[in-house]
Image (cartoon, rainbow, N blue to C red):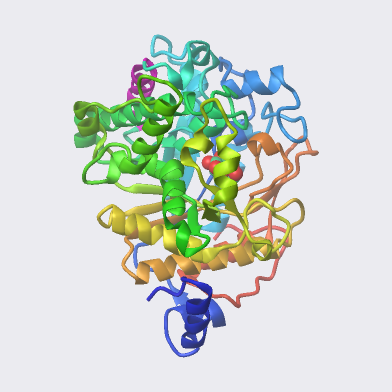
């Protein structure tokens, strides 16, 4: 049963929910069970927490370069030079994971810490040692490492050579992936190739929100998309052919898929285009039966490119052998999800985009979006609370991609300050509940991962937005970590394997390790 449709239908279901499971828990606070064997974890990424940016042989990444050359790239003119200092405090991080009782910890590897020249000619012993210590500490407490090979901190040297718009990145990234499989694959059984292609290619290469602030919309973002898909597939095939039979792990990509709801009945196509331009462009080539980029997206870009006098589409083609190489190159779907938008296309949309003359990703997609003020439930104006969008996105992936198993690799809420984070608690409960509804309605979800274990360097927002279950005191040189209310609530979900909407934790100063 889908409780999340149009407003009229929602009212109907709200009434129906008075009597029917599963949605009554969502409305009334019934205790709901998580499926047997369901995995619960939390996540971070290297540049956002590690610090030690130039220590023990590590070389410069695109974020070191960007934040040093443009000190006010981020909202509060900060950087990740020290961040949460996890390079030195990893034991405390693992202690926090034990306090929570998680099944797994998702973290990422810093390419420049492992391969300071960017290439496998020199493997940095100290960098490898850091990850060995972290992985071994996790395994000592039975916490599975879920390792993201690449979470945006590209070696600056490779950026100087063009980064993700240079097709050689497929070899460079493949070589790096091979090194890390060989170094850590005896103990790591969950590999995520790349985190969030849309953000990397659109914000980093099409725009200026993320490094390397390449700013060539409608061109660089598409080149990045093609190279990234092939690089991801390269890592998948290397693992498949050379490592899987000895290491027995799984490998997949994490895609950020937000939900786009048609604003009116006339906006179904606009919402569909929004989905395709945001995440279908990455998901379709990997997970659909046909492979390749979505047809509608290919057509839109080709038509507009022609109108602009170009002899070929700005979206590079995938050849039949590339389509085959990419198709099926993920064991499961890694889903990052935060919020929902209404999408529309009307006279204003057409006139707005018709004024743009040069190439533009937004004009190619040709839709507009907005969020409702009532979705703001607390401090965050970026992660608005729309749990029904989570339900819808999960079911769309399930239906479109042949019931692919899904691991939720990121979901979370930003606050600005404070330990009593009621808004984050509401958010997590609502989203976990929506996920349980999706499981009830057929989705094959194997686990859930809260973003984030602790406050960290939030890219262009610096330290102004805080996603942590644990607060980090960035004014304190020892970077003290303190559990928020949401940490206690998540711990109880993990301990009981149930979601109890009414559970009120007693908050001592420290969570004891069970
Ligand atoms: C990224 C994280 C980021 C989070 C919150 C995701 O897009 O993978 O690195 O911190 O969203 O903005």
Asked whether 181 falls inside the magenta stretch, the response is: yes
Q: How many marks?
A: 0
Image x and y of residue 388, in percent: 50, 66
Asked whether 204 falls inside the magenta stretch, the response is: no
Foreground pick, 145 / 163: 163
For this view, does 211 lie left or right of residue 20? Answer: right
Foreground pick, 390 / 239: 390
At x 45% / y 22%, what residue is drawn? 164
Occupied quadrant, residue 320: top left
* Position of 159 relative to 203 (above/below): above
Image x and y of residue 95, in percent: 57, 48
At x 37% / y 40%, what residue is drawn? 297
Occupied quadrant, residue 228: top left
At x 22% / y 43%, what residue is drawn? 290
The quadrant of the image that shows the C terminus is bottom right
Magenta span: predominant SS is helix
> Ligand 1 is located in which of the four quadrants?
top right
Occupied quadrant, residue 121: top left
Foreground pick, 329 / 474: 329
At x 47% / y 67%, what residue is drawn? 434
* Position of 470 relative to 31 (above/below): above
Question: Magenta segment range?
Answer: 168-184
For this view, does 165 lie left or right of residue 383? Answer: left
């Amino acid at each position: 049963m889908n409780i999340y449709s149009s407003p009229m239908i929602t009212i109907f279901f709200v009434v129906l929910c008075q009597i029917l499971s599963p949605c009554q828990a969502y409305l009334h606070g019934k205790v709901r069970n998580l499926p047997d064997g369901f995995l619960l974890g939390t996540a971070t990424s290297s540049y956002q927490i590690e610090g030690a940016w130039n220590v023990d042989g590590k070389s410069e990444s695109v974020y070191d370069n960007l934040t040093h050359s443009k000190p006010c790239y981020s909202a509060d003119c900060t950087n990740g030079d020290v961040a949460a200092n996890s390079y030195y405090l990893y034991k405390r991080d693992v202690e926090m994971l034990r306090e929570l009782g998680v099944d797994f910890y998702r973290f990422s590897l810093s390419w420049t810490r492992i391969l300071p020249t960017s290439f496998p000619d020199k493997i940095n012993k100290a960098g490898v040692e850091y990850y060995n210590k972290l992985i071994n500490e996790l395994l000592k407490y039975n916490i599975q490492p879920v390792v993201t090979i690449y979470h945006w901190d590209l070696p600056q040297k490779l950026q100087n050579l063009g980064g993700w718009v240079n097709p050689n990145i497929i070899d460079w990234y493949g070589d790096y992936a091979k090194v890390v499989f060989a170094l850590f694959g005896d103990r790591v059984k969950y590999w995520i190739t790349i985190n969030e292609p849309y953000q990397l290619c659109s914000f980093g290469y099409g725009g200026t929100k993320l490094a390397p602030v390449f700013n060539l919309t409608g061109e660089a973002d598409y080149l990045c998309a093609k190279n990234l898909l092939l690089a991801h597939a390269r890592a998948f095939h290397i693992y498949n052919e050379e490592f899987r039979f000895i290491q027995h792990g799984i490998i997949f990509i994490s895609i950020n898929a937000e939900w786009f709801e048609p604003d009116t009945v006339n906006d179904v196509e606009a919402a569909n285009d929004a989905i395709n331009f945001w995440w279908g462009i990455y998901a379709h080539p990997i997970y659909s039966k046909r492979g390749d980029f979505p047809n509608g997206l290919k057509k839109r870009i080709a038509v507009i490119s022609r109108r602009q006098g170009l002899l070929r589409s700005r979206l590079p083609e995938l050849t039949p052998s590339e389509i085959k190489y990419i198709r099926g190159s993920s064991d499961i779907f890694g889903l990052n999800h935060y919020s929902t938008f209404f999408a529309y296309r009307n006279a204003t949309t057409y006139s707005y985009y018709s004024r743009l003359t040069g190439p533009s990703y937004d004009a190619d997609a040709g839709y507009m979006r907005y969020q409702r003020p009532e979705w703001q439930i607390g401090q965050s104006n970026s992660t608005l609370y729309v749990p029904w969008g989570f339900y819808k996105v999960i079911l769309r992936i399930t239906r479109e991609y042949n019931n692919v198993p899904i691991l939720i690799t990121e979901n979370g809420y930003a606050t600005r300050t404070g330990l009593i984070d009621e808004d984050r608690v509401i958010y997590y409960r609502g989203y976990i509940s929506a996920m349980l509804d999706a499981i009830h309605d057929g989705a094959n979800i194997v686990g859930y991962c809260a973003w984030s274990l602790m406050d960290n360097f939030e890219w262009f927002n610096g330290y102004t937005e805080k996603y942590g279950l644990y607060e980090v005191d960035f004014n304190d040189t020892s970077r003290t970590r303190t559990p928020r209310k949401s940490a206690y609530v998540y711990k109880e979900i993990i301990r009981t394997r149930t979601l109890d909407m009414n559970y009120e934790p007693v908050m001592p100063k420290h969570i004891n390790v069970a």
